[in-house]
Image (tube, rainbow, N blue to C red):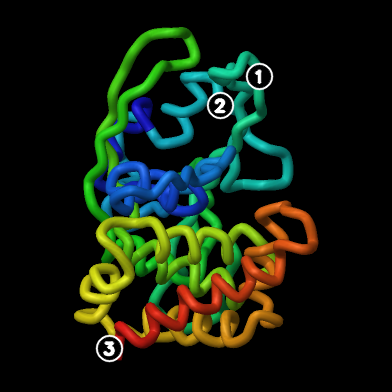
Amino acid sequence: SRALKHYEDALVLVGGWVPYLLIEGNPRPGSPFTHVGSIDIDFVVDPNKVGEDEYRTIVELIRGVGWRTIAGKRFSFARAVPCPDGVTREIQVDFLTPAPSQGGRQHRHRPIQLDLQARTMRGAELALRHNAPRKLSGILPGGAESSVEFLMLDVVGCLGTKGIALGERFKHKDAYDVVAVLDDYGPGIGEIARLVKPYLEDDLLSEALRVIEEKFRTPRSEGPMWYSEFLVEDPAGREQNAARAVRIVEEFQRALR
């Protein structure tokens, strides 16, 4: 993100790092919970804030600091990064964007700049409407201390995009992220519901909330099962975890009414 400072108003962090950073920045008081985070990085690009005539394109900037194109994935780049635990891991960054609003055939990719085709993502509009600035400090791969400011999904955008994702793919971590945010972000579910309520007329957000409700309807529904399996606990504890996930989502749904 530091290499892309020129584009900081056009990029919104989405995906698996958002729940981690939301909870880290505003944890539920007294909770010992630590989110697992992620390995890969996802950005939604606002096509209205990126020009073709920029001094250096997004791709030029990230290639300049060691990222390389992934074969067959026009929107993805990778780099081997030394991690604090001493292991070097292959990190992937994906650039996503809303599909064009005009009619006609929908394509999987959308041109952003001459050398960047971002992957279209359902629900990406939520990222452009529901985000907030975030500052993060850390150690660069070369060992230097640094800090960076960037835009990141807020809790409304996080639940919205995760809800859309739950309805479109089979991924256990989506269910884990939803439950983690509801259970451990900020002062509690009631406050999260208060933040979400003003946007219930938004069609995409409304769809996302319906998906979350449907996926967590019973302990045997997909959401609770995926959540409990993601925790990788012994089978004896999975039923308890699944039932708890349902209770958390039910409390959130009641608070929205």
Amino acid residing under circle 1 = Thr
Q: Residue tagged by mark 2?
A: 67
What number is the disc on residue 201? 3
Q: Marks 1 and 3, how far apart in space?
A: 45 Å
Disc 3 crowd rating (10 Å Cα; few below 14, some 14-19, many 20+) is: few
Considering only order in the chain, which callout, 3 or 2, is on the residue closer to the N terminus?
Answer: 2
Residue 70 placed where, x, y %?
A: 67, 37
- Residue 36 placement, left or right of 194: right
Label 3 residue SS: loop
Q: Quadrant of residue 165 in the image?
A: bottom right
Amino acid residing under circle 3 = Glu
Which residue shows up at 47% across the image and 87% down it?
A: 210
For the N terminus, the quadrant is top left
Which residue shows up at 48% across the image and 34% down it?
A: 59
Q: What number of labels is visible?
A: 3
Q: Quadrant of residue 134 in the image?
A: top left
Residue 206 placed where, x, y %?
A: 38, 85
Seen as rendered, the residue at the extreme top is 143
Disc 2 crowd rating (10 Å Cα; few below 14, some 14-19, many 20+) is: some
Q: Nearer the viewer, residue 108 or 137?
A: 137
Label 1 residue SS: strand
Amino acid residing under circle 2 = Trp
Label 2 residue SS: loop
Relative to 218, say whether 126 is above or below.
above
Which residue shows up at 72% across the image and 39% down it?
A: 71
Q: Marks 2 and 3, how far apart in space?
A: 40 Å
